């Protein structure tokens, strides 16, 4: 009998589809002990989530089928229990709880959060309604929901994304489980909210001795919070061990590929990100050969056999499933890539100039829609973008990044201020005169699937701008231009007749980039273009954008909330908070010496894929959430969350001042500038 809290042995799960049998989990084994935090990492489709759903008997059967293995929880084999048996229902929620990636799909929008939390408390703990309600209030207080006594009767739609995830944690903890599974629980959250949620989970584990499984594609999260790690690929465990051992001595080529692809705050920024070649393995055409063989740099003749490699043992409990010993490649596992050239001295020519830009949305009330106020989404925003430059734009959700991008493109009309593009004012241009401007400015959206018409072929989507802008082309010339665009973004032109749903996530984002380039723009706005992608695909897209910038002379506005990615691609960076710019700097200055407390907190919240470095870092944890734009704080907008705020900060709004060449910030606590003031 296993001594582990949960021990999964040789799990096999398949899905029977019209195209064939999908081997989603193929002989995976792992364990977790009481009070332990482990991480399971890998690209999308590696079998991480299906493994968890299988052991809880939550996969749809059919088409799913658990074909073998054991899942011993406290000595009971869950795979031997019927999905809806009393024993299985007692384990689900009572013994093992799961926190899902998207809380709004897990929370019922027509029931109050109190009703949803107390339901499981009454079922598993047998408490009365009054006792269950009080426990729910205590749990909401524990996870940091303010005014829990009142807000227990709120609906999920009345909370922010971070607060909804806190509610999911309260629900998971409601019945005192012995194991919590967090399935990509922070993927869609800002870095500061992500840090708060993970610190909360870590604190719960420490206090209650609950075990925690972190499922993620973010190696940095595992490095900061987990004790042991399992690396999965195509349904198989590739490597496992203590985090210190795996991160310092990665012993499988796939682990090495993931670590090299991850941008980090202490990485070399003068070289491209290393990428894993090709696409993840197709689980339908999977054979008994090592699943990583087709993408492996070190694959050799002995790897090309129809047999899965057995485990090679290294340090304490550290093993990798690879035919080759790590000594054959570990000495040069940090891969050299092509150098890149950042614009330290950018072009003096200004392409985009934003002066005192504001965008207000009216707040109305009653059936007559009487205006009672304004939502100040953008408030007195000023900056410039030089030709050939990449300007990074960062900040938490709700700070106005996307509103700014849409206002620059004139999808929103500004409420005040000026926007100049290539010397021409476009903020007051009538709609009929915007067509030529929009030919020079294009947008790459966050969700590639949502921005591609599913009824058109990929070639038709990419060629739409060509048809709209370039009249008189022959059919042959039109097809030649589409082929050129496909090749430019690294796609095979023979795929142009496929529908968007037939492409992977990374390929769909390449389609979006090709579509944006079709009109021959000089300025491209990239709105969170990689946030939904795996780390290996992220690296490919970042490198592609940098290559295209160099080849086509493009200028980028790159919007993101991950400062490690922004650091790698940007020449200068603008930091926004609650509709205002709080800091502007060259990329190297900002990361070497951030001036504004908000920028410092954003940088502190970003984990790095190095457990030893994480333990040494001094961190500034940002408390609370971004205030509502309808109730903006008086004085400095950041003062309610600032650890250095004084009485002056609550009464006066600081002006943007220059503290070093090209380094501007708006904060009273920095001190007096030592340089003449110039516009940033």
Image (spheres, rainbow, N blue to C red):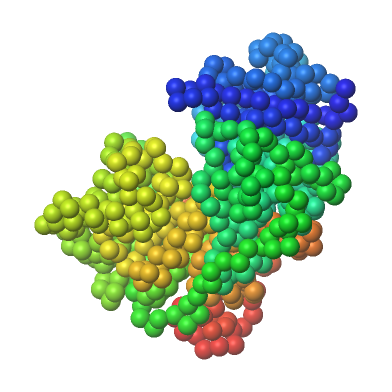
Nearer to the camera, 377 or 516:
516
Quadrant in which the N terminus appears: top right
Q: Tell me which residue sits at (44%, 62%) in the image.
A: 545
Left or right of 346? Residue 461 is left
Residue 128 to residue 569: above or below: above
Nearer to the camera, 226 or 336:
336
Residue 104 to residue 533: above or below: above
Q: Tell me which residue sits at (71%, 44%) in the image.
A: 322
Determine the residue located farthest toward the front in the rendered image.
301
Residue 240 image offset from top left, x and y in percent: 76, 43
**Visible residue check, residue 265:** no
Left or right of 559? Residue 69 is right
Residue 310 location, quadrant: top right
Q: Tell me which residue sits at (79%, 44%) in the image.
A: 312
Residue 85 image offset from top left, x and y in percent: 69, 10
**Visible residue check, residue 478:** yes
Residue 473 image offset from top left, x and y in percent: 14, 56
Q: Tell me which residue sits at (41%, 46%) in the image.
A: 508
Residue 256 location, quadrant: bottom right
Residue 12 image offset from top left, x and y in percent: 66, 25
């Amino acid at each position: 009998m296993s001594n582990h809290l949960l021990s999964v042995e040789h799990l096999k799960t398949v899905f029977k589809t019209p195209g064939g049998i999908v081997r989603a989990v193929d002989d995976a084994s792992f364990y977790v002990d009481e009070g332990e935090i482990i991480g399971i990492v890998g690209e999308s489709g590696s079998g991480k989530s299906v493994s968890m759903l299988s052991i809880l008997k939550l996969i749809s059967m059919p088409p799913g089928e658990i074909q073998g293995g054991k899942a011993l929880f406290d000595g009971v084999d869950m795979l031997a229990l019927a999905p809806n048996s009393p024993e299985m229902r007692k384990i689900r929620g009572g013994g093992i709880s799961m926190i899902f990636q998207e809380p709004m799909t897990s929370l019922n929008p027509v029931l109050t959060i109190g009703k949803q939390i107390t339901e499981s408390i009454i079922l598993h703990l047998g408490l009365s309604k009054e006792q269950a309600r009080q426990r729910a209030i205590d749990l909401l207080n524990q996870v940091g929901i303010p005014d829990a006594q009142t807000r227990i009767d709120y609906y999920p739609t009345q909370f922010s994304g971070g607060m909804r995830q806190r509610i999911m944690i309260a629900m998971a903890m409601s019945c005192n489980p012995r194991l919590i599974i967090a399935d990509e629980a922070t993927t869609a959250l800002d870095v500061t909210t992500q840090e708060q949620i993970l610190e909360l989970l870590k604190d719960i584990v420490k206090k209650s001795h609950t075990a925690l499984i972190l499922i993620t594609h973010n190696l940095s999260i595992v490095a900061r919070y987990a004790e042991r790690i399992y690396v999965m690929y195509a349904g198989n465990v590739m490597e496992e061990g203590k985090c210190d051992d795996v991160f310092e001595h990665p012993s499988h080529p796939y682990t090495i590929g993931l670590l090299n692809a991850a941008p980090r705050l202490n990485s070399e920024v003068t070289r491209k990100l290393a990428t894993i070649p090709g696409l993840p393995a197709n689980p339908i055409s999977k054979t008994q050969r090592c699943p990583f063989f087709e993408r492996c740099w070190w694959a050799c003749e002995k790897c090309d056999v129809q047999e899965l490699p057995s485990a090679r043992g290294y340090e304490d409990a550290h093993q990798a499933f690879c035919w080759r010993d790590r000594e054959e490649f570990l000495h040069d596992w940090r891969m050299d890539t092509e150098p890149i050239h950042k614009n330290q001295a950018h072009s003096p020519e200004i392409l985009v100039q934003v002066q005192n830009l504001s965008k207000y949305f009216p707040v109305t009330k009653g059936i007559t829609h009487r205006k009672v106020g304004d939502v100040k989404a953008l408030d007195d925003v000023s900056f410039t973008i030089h030709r050939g430059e990449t300007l990074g734009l960062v900040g938490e959700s709700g700070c106005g990044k996307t509103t700014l991008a849409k206002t620059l493109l004139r999808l929103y009309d500004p409420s005040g201020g000026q926007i100049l593009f290539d010397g021409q004012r476009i903020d007051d241009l009538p709609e009929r005169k915007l067509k030529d401007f929009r030919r020079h400015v294009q947008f790459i959206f966050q969700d590639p699937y949502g921005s591609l018409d599913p009824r058109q072929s990929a070639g038709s989507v990419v060629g739409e701008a060509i048809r709209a802008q370039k009249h008189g082309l022959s059919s042959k010339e039109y097809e030649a231009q589409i082929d050129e665009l496909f090749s430019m973004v690294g796609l095979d032109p023979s795929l142009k007749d496929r529908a968007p749903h037939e492409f992977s996530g990374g390929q769909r984002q390449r389609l979006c980039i090709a579509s944006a380039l079709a009109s021959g723009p000089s300025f491209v706005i990239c709105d969170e273009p990689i946030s939904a992608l795996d780390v290996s695909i992220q690296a490919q897209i970042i490198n592609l954008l940098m290559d295209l910038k160099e080849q086509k002379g493009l200028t980028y506005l790159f919007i993101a909330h991950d400062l490690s990615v922004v650091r790698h691609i940007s020449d200068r960076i603008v930091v926004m908070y609650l509709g205002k710019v709080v800091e502007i700097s060259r990329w190297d200055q900002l990361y070497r010496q951030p001036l504004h407390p908000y920028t410092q907190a954003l940088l502190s919240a970003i984990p790095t894929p190095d457990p030893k470095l994480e333990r040494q870092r001094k961190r500034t944890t940002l408390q609370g959430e971004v205030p509502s734009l309808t109730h903006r704080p008086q004085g400095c907008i950041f003062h309610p969350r600032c650890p250095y705020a004084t009485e002056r900060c609550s009464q006066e709004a600081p002006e943007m001042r220059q503290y070093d060449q090209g380094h501007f910030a708006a904060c009273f606590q920095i001190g007096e500038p030592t340089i003449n003031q110039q516009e940033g």
